[in-house]
Amino acid sequence: MSTTQPEQAQTYRNVMESLVVEELEKQLQRLPPKVVSYVNKAEVIAYALNRLPPLYATSERGWQQQRERARRGMDQQIMTAVRQAIAAVQRDPLRAVIPLKVEEEQESMAALQGLKELLGREELSWRDLVNAVEHALIKTARGEITWRKRASVSVQPSQWNDTRYLL
């Protein structure tokens, strides 16, 4: 008689995915906006990841160890894979692509981009997000930061008690 374990949420992640995304963002900042508009980020990321070894982790400690391992020995390899991926995707910018459904990683990167804009910190990464928010909250409490409502926020004026927006 066999016993089955209950289904669990995904408890492993590939560290290389976040490193490739970070490297892509760095490289895109150095490209002309017109070129960037033709770059399909998802395709670049997939192309680069297919040329890099996976580095999976199942714990926070393992995550940090894998990130350090990659930073120590694979920075150049990651940079090269992303550069090649951008070049490969650019060669055929008119190719029709049916994208996969939005996954958690894409959603989290969109959330990070929103936080970058809200906090006015383009260099922001998940690694330093907590410190950046804490810093903004402290400065807000001290009255050093002024806020205003974002145009895209659908909140009625009567529901918005504070008119500060990070500058």
Image (cartoon, rainbow, N blue to C red):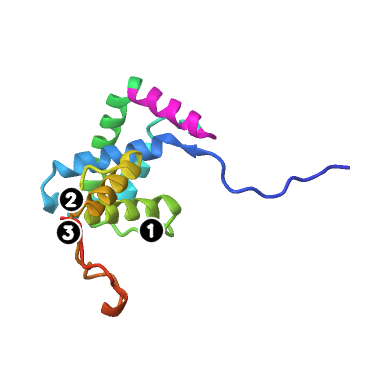
Labels 1 and 2: the sequence-earlier one: 2
Q: Residue visible at 19% across and 51% down?
A: 120
Q: Is residue 100 left or right of residue 151?
A: right
Q: Reply above or below: 60 against 140.
A: above
Query: In the drawing, what numbered circle is on residue 31?
Result: none
Which is closer to the viewer, label 1 or label 2? Answer: 2
Q: Which residues are magenta?
A: 57-71
Provide residue 31's location: percent of width, then percent of height: 13, 44
The structure residue drawn at horizontal position 39% and vertical position 39%, both measured from the top left corner, is 17
User: Callout 2: 10 Å neighbours few (<14), some, many (20+)?
Assistant: some
User: Which of the numbered marks, if any, corresponds to residue 36?
Assistant: 2
**Amino acid beneath label 3:** Thr
Amino acid type, label 1: Pro
Q: Is residue 55 above or below residue 141?
A: above
Q: Which residue appears farthest toward the right when viewing the image?
A: 1
Task: Identify the residue position indicated by label 1 in the image.
Answer: 99
| Front in this rendered view, residue 51 or 56 | 56
Choose the circle earlier in sequence order: 1 or 3. 1
Quadrant where the N terminus sits is: top right
Count of numbered circles in the view: 3
- Give the distance between the C-alpha atoms of the residues marked 2 and 3, in whole angstroms: 32 Å
Q: Vertical placement of 91 versus 94: above or below?
A: above
Q: Is residue 64 magenta?
A: yes
Q: Does dot 2 land on a helix, a strand or a loop?
A: helix
Which quadrant of the view contains residue 12? top right
Pick the residue in front: 6 or 161: 161
Residue 146: mark: 3
Identify the element where label 1 is drawn.
loop
Give the spatial CA distance, label 1 vs label 2.
18 Å
Secondary structure of the residue carrying tag 3 is: loop
